[in-house]
Amino acid sequence: MTGGGGAGTAVERKDSGTAKPAPERDGIFIKVPRHRSYPGDESSTFHDVMSHGDSRRLWWNTYATTAHETHHHANALVQRTFYLGRPCSGFYVWDGRAAIYPEPRFLKRDIAKFVPRSLRDDRFFYVWGQWDSDEFPLYVLDEWIAYITDAKVIAEYAYLEKRPAGYRTGEGQGCIEMMVYGLALYRAIQTHDPKYLERNPDFREFLAFLCCETLASYEVTQRFPQYRWQPEYLEKTFRKDPAAAALRSILESLLIGSPSAARIAFGRTFGPSVILAGRIEGLD
Ligand SMILES: [Zn+2]
């Protein structure tokens, strides 16, 4: 063993005594323990999120909203626990896993121009609005992840939520809209801070992971009529609007190797011919 880190070794750290042990990792993720014990079905997303965060209210009208709001707290806990010493955002990504990334060097408002007008929907205010988070472009991911939790929870609790017959809600579709804003964030990074992807080489994989989680969770919610909300947003506008071509191209490149997610996103899979045609970014 060389260069051991125990007390009395030759190399002394300036912050000796306060350094935290390196967190245990799982691929690109940091493993995190539960924040608190919480009653209920430990196999559910609701329980997963509720035991890794602690919202200031016990209950927010529905299982989905309660988990969504608590997820923001779980994200904040990750940010505080693994703070990078500079502006950064932390994310709890289910199953005891987390990630933290420094903020890219532009404003959140710079993302807006990469969102085609046809895809600016009810949640666009998270991109153009919420000005106190303008210096934190990754705030868009904080919301996106909370909306994925909405979709996961309503799929798992579809019957318990007891929506009145004929009542429809967009809680399943919200993660698709937020995914679009996440893809626009990626465009903003490519344009305004392209070195970000060199400094954070696993960020692309992180976004690909979020896209797969989004599409898989959304697909399950769409099996319940009460959650089939504005399917044309994905199935028509995103897939067909010429103004969305750049975002589609990014999503295609992120979903290589994930054919089931690609089929949900595009209604088809795509193979080597697309790659050879040079439409895929980020490949040599
Ligand atoms: Zn939220």
Image (cartoon, helix red, strand yellow):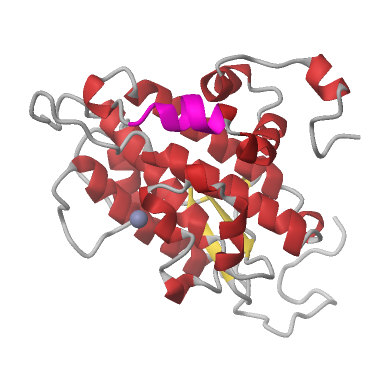
Query: Residue at the spot x=49%, y=43% of the render?
Result: 119
The answer to whether residue 35 is seen in the rendering is no
Q: What residue do we see at 61% from left, 50% from top? A: 184
Horizontal side of 18 relative to 126 (left or right) equals right
Q: Is any atom of residue 194 visible in this view?
A: yes
Q: Quadrant of the N terminus?
A: bottom right
Query: Image height check: is 86 above or below 207?
Result: below
Give percent across and percent down for residue 114: 62, 52
Q: Quadrant of the C terminus?
A: top right
Q: Is residue 56 magenta?
A: no
Of the four image quadrants, the one with ligand 1 is: bottom left
Q: Residue 97 location, x and y as percent?
A: 51, 45
Identify the residue at image location x=41%, y=69%: 130
* 248 with respect to 91 (left or right): right
Magenta extent: 230-239
Q: Main secondary structure of the magenta part?
A: helix
Q: Is residue 19 above or below residue 196?
A: below
